[in-house]
Amino acid sequence: MNPGAGEAPRTAAVAVDIAAAATDRLFDYWIPPEWIGRLRPGWRVRVPFGRSWREGFVIELRREPSVPPERVRPIAAVLDPVPALTPEALELARWCAHAYGTTLVQALRVMLPAGLRGDRIRRRTEEMLAPGPAFPSPEQEAEHAAAPARRRVLELLRRSPGPWRRRELERAAGVSAATLRAMVRAGLLAVERRALERSPWSEPAEADRRPPLTPAQERAVQAVREAVESGSPAVFLLQGVTGSGKTEVYLRALEAVLAAGRQAIVLVPEIALTPQTVARFRARFGDRVAVFHSGLGDGERYDEWWRVRRGEADLVVGARSAVFAPCRRLGLIVVDEEQEASYKQEETPRYHARSVALERARRAGCPVLLGSATPALESLAEAQRGRYRLLRLPERVGGRPLPAAEAVDMRRELAEGNRSLFSRRLAEALDEVLARREQAVLLLNRRGFHTFVLCRECGHVLRCPKCAVSLAYHADQALLRCHYCGWAERPPSRCPACGGSALGYHGSGTQRVEEELARRWPAARVLRMDADSTVRKGSHEAIYRRFLRGEADVLVGTQMVAKGWDVGGVTLVGVVNADTALNLPDFRAAERTFQLLTQAAGRAGRGERPGRVLIQSYAPEHYAIQAALRMDPEAFARVELPIRRELGYPPFRRLVRLLVLASSPEEAERVARAAAGELARRLPAGARLVGPSEAPLGRLKGQARWHLLLSGERVGPLRDAALEAAARAGREAAGARLAVDVDPLSLL
Ligand code: ADP
Ligand code: ZN
């Protein structure tokens, strides 16, 4: 029953999943006779490759092999009952590879769950590390004078024996995977297999509340619903202040999608992918929801993926890579908090999930709904140009007022003799909140206790030996730590540069805020949330839940506390220092500051009682801070857009960055200059080349970094020129790595 099988193609061109996918080659294999006429592109296969077995994807069928037939080997097995990749998915992978300048295999890798990439699926259990049989007492350890890295692990485990996940232990102790492996071999650590925790959203769905819509919500839902029903590839930008009911708009639009028999993807930032968020989708749609987040084990991810592929789940809620979910009847893509930087992947392929969503929806003929209280300037500009349809939710639901926000000038505090972290206004506001038994959130976007250590005699600042950044002092472990690579060391008693003994500790982080709170308000119950206090799985959620239940009066934290939360008891939001990000050497510094402050302010007054926001700054007149006080993205854009236009930055021009990593700064500079030379020869018309220069973060994890920035009207020619220049310069630079970043978000 294979009409025409005689003439059907006999060979398959396969993208083989090899680790170093430097080439974009496809390899030819014979199709097994019983599969001739049946095998199609997108099917996963097992093939011989060199002397090993590999998995790969059939990309094309070929009547005859493109290499001499004696060199072609047969496909060993066709995996899966249906092709894992639909023709649309393959096309999207091709687009992604082209748009971001990667190989097809690199693009496919990010689209698929680990279990579909030949990695062994670890199901239901995972490896944990705990103290081993040879775990020493502190006295024994002193005798053996253990290496500093080992000692950090031992000390950490003594305080908190775990069991720990490998990654988390590496990060918390600031050691390498190799160190941990060696410690396992030495019996200092033991490996335990432990059943995976049940995923937090396997709890029963909570009861659904389906409130009648406000008129503004109704208008927004109506517009999206029409586009869903007519299959229009329109893009909507839903701009609504925090608490204006954006999520309810998503839910209603999704109802329309499911009613039309189609599937939808909802992207949320990883940090917002809490059970609280997911519960709202599950409450409305039950088991039709599939969830993708980083806490899933490979097995669970694999199962969810197939549930969507088979069409058993209609609604995908997930972080960045969920934009590739295998939906076949796509009716809508929602991107919540569309301005979030975490939608951009900072490694190959350096894709932006919002851009992929727009492209995917365009191909599928379905609308995209971007939502935010503080849209990215790129999106706002598209709305102003009329390419996106702006939908506004100008008010909070239930007539709740926006919090009253004011800036506090810290220059004046200092001039009047207040050297504390807290201005008098913030201190009084805290007094009142505590007296009324309400809750406060304090934001300081820096972790640790002190942010740098300076020698008062020679001016030397203690830096990470592997990164060009200052080390922060962490009081809880009495360690100096690098926030980029995890390096940790004991603070020296003398300056390593001049031998002087006057080392001063400066700059404040969240730990210092926590300590000062304890000193000045000893009765207040304080929780801290930052990358240090949330190392262990589920701790972010646990802290949040405790705060939600009113087990603490004050929550201190980094940007983690600014995002996506709905805690009704919070009546005060204090920003301890609004200037932390303002002075970074990045043209998006003002935009990021505006967004962070506005989101933080949005945490206040979401319950019955009105909220108040105090923003402490040494530059309170700055337009990013002024616009944040009014929570007004358009006011911010009115000042920022002309600056961007003047400087030739997005959203007026597109950028492509070429980053060079090498073991020495000389080598990085040499290769960057070579790349610049190549680029100068093939610069597209109207394009501008800036650099080469040392990247602001000139050293990271032991690698010297140089970069070049291209800007132009259209991104394609820039990308192609950069890829070509990188390939040419890379040929004479064996030790260097060149990366091309299309539409870079970070320029550090
Ligand atoms: P946003 O996503 O804009 O921050 P949410 O969608 O989380 O806002 O809404 C804030 C709160 O208001 C939620 O508790 C939600 O259940 C509630 N809510 C949303 N829409 C309505 C409505 N039309 N009537 C009453 N309550 C609503
Ligand atoms: Zn470092």
Image (cartoon, helix red, strand yellow):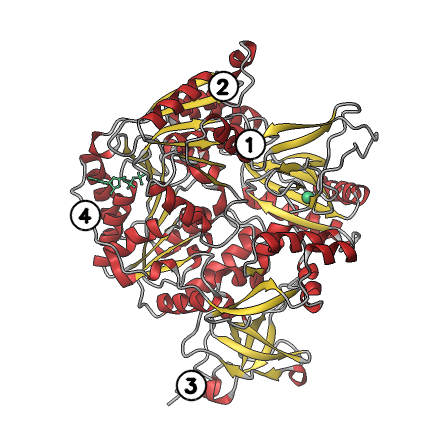
Image quadrant where one finds the C terminus: top right
Question: Based on the displayed image, in which of its 4 quarters is residue 433 positioned?
Answer: top left
Dot 3 or dot 1: first in sequence order is 3
Q: Residue at x 84, y 29 (%)?
A: 498
Q: Which residue is mark 4?
A: 210
Give me the C-alpha separation between circle 3 and circle 1. 75 Å
Horizontal arrangement in the rendering, residue 478 relative to residue 107 (left or right): right
Q: Secondary structure at mark 2?
A: loop
2 and 1 marks in contact (CB < 8 Å): no
Is 556 situated above or below 421?
below
Q: Where is mark 1, residue-wise?
A: 512
Q: Position of residue 392 (x, y in %)?
A: 29, 33
Which three-letter amino acid code belongs to the residue tagged 1? Arg
Q: Amino acid at mark 3?
A: Gly
- Residue 653 in sight here: no
**Residue annotated with mark 2:** 622
Instruction: Check disc 3 and report the residue beneath it.
Output: 4
Q: Comparing marks 4 and 3, which lies closer to the viewer?
A: 4
- Figure quarter occupied by ligand 2: top right
